[in-house]
Amino acid sequence: MSSQVAAYWYVFLKGVGITLWISWLALILGGAVGLVIGLLRIAPWAAVRWAAIVYIEVFRSVPPLVLFFGCFYGLSYAMKLDLSPFSAATIALTLTASALMAEVVRAGIESVTRGQWEAALSQGMTYPQVFRYVVWPQAIRVMLPPSVGVYISTLKDSSLASIIGYVELTKSGLLVRESTGISFEVLLIIAILYFVINYSISLVGAALERRFKYVH
Amino acid sequence: MKTMRRSVLGALAFGVLSASLGWSPAAEAQQQQQQSVLSEVLKRGVLRIATIGGNPPYSSLDPSGKPVGYDIDIANLLAEQLKLKPEFIVVDVPGRITALQTRRADVTFANFTANVERSKVIAFTDPYVVVGSIYMVKKDSPIQTVEQLNDPKYKIGFARGGTAEGISALTAPKSQKVRFDTVGDAYLAMQSGQVDSQLQDSLQNASYMAKDGDKYRNLPGNWSYEEISIGLPAGDFDWWRVLNIFVKNFNASGENARLFKKWFGYEMPAVQQKY
Amino acid sequence: MYEFALAGLLPYTGPLPRAIVLTLWLSTLSILLSVAVGVLGALCRTSTSLVLRWIGGAYVEVLRNIPLLVVIYLIFFGLAQVGLRVDGFNSALIALTLNAGAYMTEIFRGGLIAIPRGQYEAARSQGMTAFQLYRYVVFPQVFRIIYAPLGNLMIGIVIGSSLASVIGVEEVTTWMRRAGDETFRYMESFLAVGVIYVVLAQTINIGRIVTGRWLLSRAPIGHRR
């Protein structure tokens, strides 16, 4: 690494922190929204199910980059909202992540067989009790490994926030590139940093998956 | 049991529905619109300034994300005179207009050319600097004139949403246009040979030439006369009045000449007006 | 109050068909090339050679963990700086192919390893040629396993093609940005382009569902899923 680029190590470090933070935030928010949508997706009423399907299909069909623009420019014009790049990026990432999470939630809950529902209900448990004590503990095991995948995907999508001027890891790198005029090396450093972060997360995910397999 | 289950899901559905219906801040924002920015900023104590990143030496972000440059220093001076805390909002080139229209920013200092088209939706003060437009190529490029550049085999790079769009369409309509997010990206693209020429602001061009004059060459001709001005939301006379007095004093006091020298490295060129 | 007016975009619809064609062309080429890369990668990853397996694995892990945007920048700006100049469209095509190729590799590998070794041996002992083995035994089974993730990945490629807009390729997302910039009808151009992407993605999605039904209708007895 040339010393010219190395002098900016703290900028890269800060970028890594911000990238981890915004993607984590989007994962939590997307998880919460995804949980609701995922539950609606398996609701007993066709109209609600279809609404959830439309939500999921729309937000996995529209490119995150287009969503970033829609939130940053579209919303601020249409609703006269005072959206910072941070809020616009968080909303866009949450929408994308929630569509992915909804499918994860659905798969998790559907992995618990009908028979268990019926057995628990016939034991006199209420619907929320069945959900809380029978279905959820099993579903979350099925849901955890793919959630790690959603986190990695969200983390990668967060690089698009650089386009609307949010200074995360990619944008930090582009700024260093502008200051030093060194393209290849700086971009390579960003790529390596993303790889290290995401690969570590995927290793944690694989470990989780193994652990939950043993419990089964 | 079944009714319980329904009610849980029903409540969830209702929550989502009411959240989406209740979320309409438009009316509130409209009310704000009636107030002058002047009284708003004085009350707030903060001046929100929109600027563009990646546009040195006017404004660029230093690697920690902090805006620096000629435009930034002027904005700081304005905030200082108004006794307000400056707060910078970094936007892209087309985002300057958006930021003012949506009142996300009170004012722009962003290498912003005043023209009639933009004046339909936002307002400008008197200019603080005047620039032109110049085509720059690599030193060893076969292109000698803009007439030669006007050929489908050549690519011209510039930042989207700026005046370069219209100027390139007029002066070299046949060539390919490659639009980038920042002036810096367009410069890097020319540096690495991804485009054959970059259409530039003449002062920016002078700074690039001062730094890397051995690598580049300008094509003859200056293709525009652009008055770089402070942008503000339309229809706000009080705010315009304050900003215009600021510009006039800034130009007359010699402060402008000083800041220009600081960032561009040479004296501000005298403008030859032709009427 | 904001007045929603799609008509505001009308003067700007001229370049739209070309932009859609470019998005389709970029996506289609990327899909075809990444299938080729994926098949190759999967053969590497299931090969008996340790080196090939390692190369295949490294390729998949590296490309799956780096954002597509960074790969595009790296190819367009980075490679040009070290003397390898690839124009905007081809940079996007290469980046998309490399990125999707990694996922394709995993999909095809999943399909290949699902087929028990015994079937290969049985087919050979029946005197089948390699072509017959793959055409009649391996491919029909692999296809059943991979068509669903393949459909999802194809949608991912169409979505990913939107990133070509950052290096000046005049596809649909670029059109949205320019139309918005020039007319200030950002919400309308966003919704219009959103609809275009939904239609493209759902066409693939419906194709996937129809394929699934068709496979089910001719499923052998005892076939899973």
Image (spheres, coloured by chain):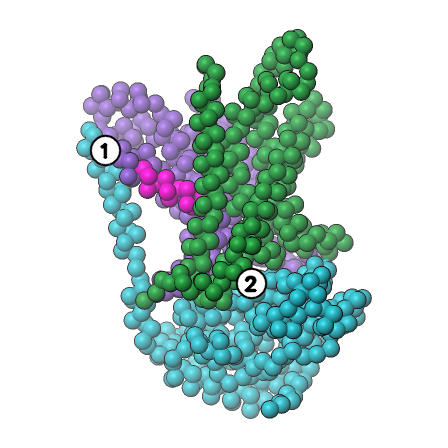
Chain colours: A purple, B cyan, C green
Q: Quadrant of the N terminus of chain C?
A: bottom left
The label on residue B5 is: 1
Q: Residue at the spot x=58%, y=51% of the render? A: C22
Quadrant holding the C terminus of chain C: top left
Question: At 70% from the left edge and 65% from the top edge, which residue is drawn?
Answer: B151
Q: Residue C154's mark? A: none
Q: Examine the rendered structure and indicate whether residue C2 appears above or below residue B132.
A: above
Seen from the viewer's position, the closer of residues C123 and A117 is C123
Q: Using a 10 Å C-alpha cutoff, classify the residue at mark 1 as few (fewer than 14 neighbours), some (14 to 19) or many (20 or more).
A: some
Disc ID at residue B65? 2
Q: What kind of element bears circle 1?
A: helix
Question: Residue B111 occupies which quadrant of the picture?
Answer: bottom right
Is B73 left or right of A53, judged from the image as shown? Answer: right
Boundaries of the magenta span:
A49-60
User: Between disc 1 and disc 2, whose residue precedes?
Assistant: 1
> Do marks 1 and 2 share a chain?
yes
User: Quick check: is A54 in the magenta stretch?
Assistant: yes
Q: Is residue A41 magenta?
A: no
Task: Name the kind of residue labelled 2 in the image.
Answer: Gly
Chain of the residue where label 1 is placed in the rendered structure: B
Residue C146 spot, x, y in % from top left: 53, 28
- Examine the residues drawn in magenta and state their main secondary structure: helix
Residue reaching furthest top? C125
Tell me if residue A110 comes above or below residue B82 in the rendering.
above
Residue type pointed to by label 1: Arg
Q: Residue at x 61, y 70 (%)?
A: B169
